[in-house]
């Protein structure tokens, strides 16, 4: 790799000085240039360059499985183990998730719906978009205080179809996200809406909108976050790939970045393992085709 560095920086620095600093003989370097790289070494260098491009395009978030799928999409054929090995040698790695706290307040007098979804999260089980939506709330810290984010996610395509952000944790927050989803998707009657038992989702106003649109209501069991695991997973991904590396001075700054993450990156470009490594937008377009 020292000879590769010298070759790549020969325009910037004298070869003699680089050979001395890197403890490579000039004769050895020129012999290497005449001999050239082995085919495998050359392929590893080329593969490392391709991996760096993909990793940067993923906001430095992809691990070896998604990098491998992105390489396949570009027409590059190699094993996942080789991709992982090259990534390790180059010091390239994906983001690791952290735990985060729930925002659910289920201590309220409002009626609770039964759990009709029963963790049937698989895309293949749902069949297509606009059959099951799942909703939840999380928070993002800023110097001004919390920014609360509510989303509605289509379990048939993993697309975020509605979202809303406010500085208050109230029913209006979740209603805005729901109204956005309804306006954008115009779902047919028979859609199922799943959420936790939070007071916002159990409120009269929220349940009334669902009833008026012919949407059945399903809720998680008490204290069981796994009953809404897909949205919890989305929030974990959002925080791992965006929020945990940022310190937002204002709520507006956080709002802008979250909007861009959802609408530009997550829905349209990010590869989802549950979708066969397509983005939600690409997956839906293939369903229509």
Image (spheres, rainbow, N blue to C red):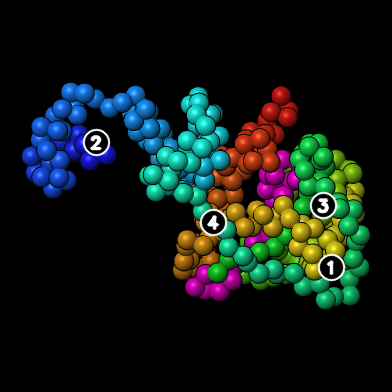
Is residue 38 in the magenta section? Answer: no
Spatial CA distance of label 2 from label 3 is 52 Å
Mark 2 or mark 4, which is nearer to you?
Answer: 2
Spatial CA distance of label 2 from label 4 is 31 Å
Sequence-wise, the earlier of marks 2 and 4 is 2
* Residue at horizontal 51 percent and vertical 42 percent from the top: 64
* Residue at horizontal 73 percent and vertical 28 percent from the top: 288
Spatial CA distance of label 1 from label 3 is 14 Å
Question: Pointer 4: residues within 10 angstroms few (<14), some, or many (20+)?
Answer: few
Q: Is residue 215 left or right of residue 238?
A: right
Determine whether label 2 and label 1 are within 8 Å by CB: no
Mark 1 or mark 4, which is nearer to you?
Answer: 4
Residue 119, numbered circle: 3
Main SS of residues in magenta: strand
Q: Position of residue 123 (x, y in %)?
A: 76, 40
Which residue position holds label 4? Answer: 96
Question: Pointer 1: residues within 10 angstroms few (<14), some, or many (20+)?
Answer: few
Secondary structure beneath dot 1 equals: loop
Sequence-wise, the earlier of marks 1 and 4 is 4
Q: Is residue 111 left or right of residue 245?
A: right
* Residue at horizontal 81 percent and vertical 72 percent from the top: 106
Residue 222, numbered circle: 1
* Residue at horizontal 82 percent and vertical 40 percent from the top: 125
Q: Which residues are magenta?
A: 142-163
Q: Position of residue 223 (x, y in %)?
A: 80, 68
Determine whether label 2 and label 3 are within 8 Å by CB: no
- Point out the image quarter for the C terminus: top right
Secondary structure beneath dot 3 equals: loop
Sequence-wise, the earlier of marks 4 and 3 is 4
Is residue 144 in the magenta section? Answer: yes
Which residue position holds label 2? Answer: 4
Secondary structure beneath dot 4 equals: loop
């Amino acid at each position: 790799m020292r000879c590769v560095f010298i070759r790549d920086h020969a325009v910037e620095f004298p070869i003699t000085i680089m050979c001395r600093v890197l403890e490579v003989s000039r004769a050895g370097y020129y012999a290497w240039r005449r001999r050239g790289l082995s085919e495998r070494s050359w392929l590893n260098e080329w593969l490392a360059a391709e991996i760096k491009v993909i990793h940067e395009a993923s906001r430095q978030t992809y691990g070896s499985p998604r990098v491998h799928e992105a390489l396949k999409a570009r027409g590059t054929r190699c094993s996942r183990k080789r991709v992982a090995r090259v990534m390790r040698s180059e010091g390239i790695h994906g983001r690791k998730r952290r735990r985060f706290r729930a925002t659910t307040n289920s201590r309220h007098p409002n009626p609770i719906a039964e759990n009709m979804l029963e963790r049937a999260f698989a895309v293949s089980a749902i069949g297509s978009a606009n059959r099951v939506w799942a909703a939840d709330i999380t928070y993002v810290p800023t110097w001004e205080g919390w920014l609360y984010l509510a989303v509605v996610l289509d379990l048939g395509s993993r697309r975020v179809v509605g979202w809303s952000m406010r500085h208050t944790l109230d029913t209006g927050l979740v209603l805005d996200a729901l109204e956005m989803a309804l306006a954008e998707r115009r779902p047919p009657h028979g859609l199922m809406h799943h959420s936790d038992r939070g007071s916002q989702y159990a409120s009269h106003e929220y349940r009334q909108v669902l009833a008026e649109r012919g949407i059945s209501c399903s809720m998680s069991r008490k204290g069981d976050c796994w009953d809404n695991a897909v949205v919890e997973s989305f929030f974990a991904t959002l925080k791992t790939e965006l929020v945990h590396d940022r310190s937002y001075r204002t709520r507006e700054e956080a709002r802008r970045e979250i909007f861009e993450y959802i609408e530009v990156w997550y829905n349209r470009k990010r590869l989802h393992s549950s979708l066969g490594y397509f983005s939600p937008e690409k997956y839906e377009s293939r369903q229509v085709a």
